[in-house]
Amino acid sequence: MKTKADRIANMPDYPFARWGERVRAARAAEVDVIRLDIGNPDLPPPDPVIEALCTCARDPGSHGYPGYRGLPALREAIAAYYARRFGVELDPTTEVVPLLGSKEGIVNTALAILDPGDLVLVPDPGYPSYTMGAIMAGARVHKFPLLPDRGFLPDLDAIPAEVARAATMMWLNYPNNPTAGTADLEFFERAVAFARRHDILLCHDVPYCEVTYDGYTPPSLMQVPGAKDVVVEFNSLSKTYNMAGWRVGMAVGNPEVLGSLFRIKSNVDSGLFLPVQEAAIRALAVPREWIEKRNRIYQARMEIALDGLSALGWDVPASKATLYLWTQVPEGWDSEGFATMLLNDAGVSVAPGSFFGKSGEGYIRISLTAPNFRIEEAMERLHTLLE
Ligand SMILES: Cc1ncc(COP(=O)(O)O)c(C=O)c1O
């Protein structure tokens, strides 16, 4: 009996699934693990969002198939958010597709656009699903490095001309996971010009655009004039409203690409549970003060972590956005070896940078998804272990 397609043979397990097993094993051995590895918000969504979910769930009419395209009111709420937040006008009918979380849309867009042998440009380090979607589609991947001396922005001119010419699709993600790098509109303009010049679909992933510090306001790639010709942007309620488990995301931008994505989706999933859609509509209307207050909680955690790391003699830059600190491991260690040692010997779980690609080797990612006292304790444990 065949149990594996060829495409599976080329696909590693999702690295965080593997790491989660290690955390479970440490916990089974009675280690009190402080999880600073995945970007899983530990705080609840806004109260009215939960109320909207419950109210809709009590309605007997809410439990059938919800329709494939998403409620018009949800698509309108997404378009209104883009207009309010970025000054970008979207047609809610043709330029917005609600997603079951952005991860689903990232992979399904690869399946919708790529043919076997097509070439995809992917940032290294980067969120693993950009590569996995390409592998599922039988496409080839060219990784371009994100390096600290360029603020983790790619050097577009360093992408070989023949690679750029051959590419079908390119991924960018700012504010960036895992490096916390940020991009300004001027860089996005150059990226759109690059995509136009080489006839590439530019996919931008912005789940961290509302997780920001010190008044930083990230732009959307959709703000570049004419972006809709070549860009699809993926956004998510997971980090913006602490709704990671609810699975709500959105793809916006080029209507032809979104049409192809919709054709895949309508054959694969049957839409978002209606109460989740009603809750998402409510979330998108939550006043910005809620987001700002939540971000101040993360910022306080970041300051505790930075103080603790600085006491270890580590010079870690403060992040302007995202849930993460990105820092080099000490000399003589590789990422996974160092992270495994921290897990086993200190009960502190951080993400090995190598999980995000070759250029992530030599780094760890520390997630700010635990309360102050746990981050303090994690820092104390690191101090005891490493001093
Ligand atoms: C860069 C990036 N893109 C996409 C996602 C997936 O988010 P969602 O929960 O919307 O699927 C994540 C989640 O951590 C992420 O870090």
Image (cartoon, rainbow, N blue to C red):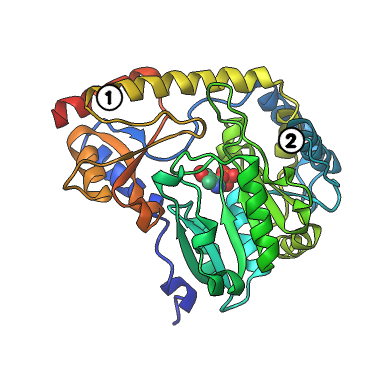
Tell me how many marks there are. 2
Image quarter for ligand 1 equals top right
Name above or below for residue 92 compared with residue 43.
below
Q: Which residue is mark 1?
A: 310
Q: What percent of the width, then of the height, locates residue 235? A: 65, 43
Q: How far, Cα to Cα, is label 2 from label 1?
A: 36 Å
Say which amino acid is labelled 2: Phe
Q: Amino acid at mark 1?
A: Ser
Q: Circle 2: is it few (<14), some (14-19), or many (20+) Cα within 10 Å?
A: some
Question: Between 163 and 51, which is closer to the camera in this rendering?
Answer: 163
Quadrant assignment, res 25: top left
Looking at the rendered structure, the secondary structure element under dot 1 is: helix
- Residue wearing tag 2: 86
Q: Quadrant of residue 268?
A: bottom right
Residue situated furthest bottom in the rendering: 1
Evaluate whether residue 313 shows in this view: yes
In the image: residue 47, left or right of residue 179: right
Residue drawn at 15 percent across, 30 percent down = 385
